[in-house]
Amino acid sequence: MRLCFRRNAVLREIFNYLYGMFYLFILLFILLSAALLATIFESGKPGLWSRIFRIAVVVFATGIFSYYFVTRSLTQFRKDSLTVQLINKLPFPLDFYIVKVQTGKDSAPTYETSHPGDIRSGYYRIEYLDMTDSDEFWIAGFMGNKNMVYFSQHAVPNKNEDQIIEIQNYINQSQKLSETAATQIESLKFGNMKTAIWMTLDLLLLFLNITLLIRRRK
């Protein structure tokens, strides 16, 4: 068995992190747009304050993107997390998602979704799940964008015991639960797409602001 890729994640931390970053990217878009508009003030006291504001926005945006890319590249690990090893023994690569189920005593269940990614045949991937408020998770495997060919439900009676899950058959253990999982996965994809769009716009505006600052300085 060969190691495809090791990606550690604590579901709750990643979900909250990305949720907050989405709105932060919107704020960056507003600030960077305002910095571009501030270029109309070129001389006098308004020009001085305009330049200070633009430099502050560029420094702030650069710091945010540096923090974002560094934290995304670092391994996230917690001692009390549940280790889940996914092994793809099917002849084709599948795109896997994990949905953690949180069920309250007096409330409807809530879900947290993560994306371990593609696992090729004969490879495995390791995930670290924070199961503090959960005792169940689901695994969904896709062949293509929307063709779910694998779904399994996993209870966690002992949170100190790691789990090794071998995907050997194309199965769907529950049609109803797999539909719920598909909805959660689509929501995650849509959220990631929105974040990617705002990130692209912010990077473009940041580049324009830096270019104008350097050109004006010359």
Image (cartoon, helix red, strand yellow):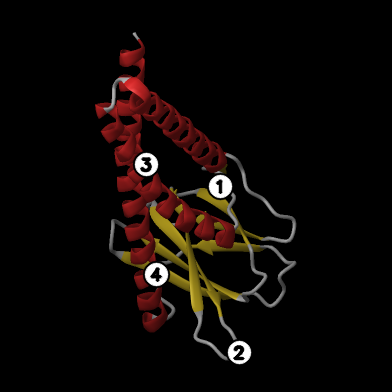
Q: Quadrant of residue 161?
A: bottom right
Camera-nearest label, 3 or 2? 3
Query: Looking at the image, is mark 3 or mark 4 earlier in the sequence?
Result: 3
| Mark-to-mark CA distance, 1 and 2 | 32 Å
Residue 162 visible in image: yes
Q: Dots 1 and 3: beta carbons under 8 Å?
A: no
Q: Write down the residue under mark 4.
A: 184
| Disc 3 crowd, CA 10 A, few/some/many (<14, 14-19, 20+) | many
Kind of residue indicated by mark 4:
Gln
SS category of the residue bearing label 4: helix
Distance from the alpha carbon under mark 3 to that under mark 4: 32 Å
Task: Please identify, in this view, whether the residue under mark 4 or under mark 1 is nearer the observer.
Answer: 4
Residue 48 sits in quarter? top left
How far apart, in angstroms, are the residues tagged by discs 3 and 2? 43 Å
> Measured along the vertical axis of the image, is residue 176 above or below residue 76?
below
Q: Is residue 160 above or below residue 153?
A: above
Q: Residue at x 31, y 39 (%)?
A: 34
Residue type of the residue flagged with mark 1: Arg
Mark before the other along the chain sequence, 4 or 1: 1
User: Where residue 7 is drawn, which disc sits there?
Assistant: 1
Q: Of residues 162 and 191, which is closer to you in this image?
A: 191
Q: Is residue 79 above or below residue 177?
A: above
Disc 2: which residue: 105
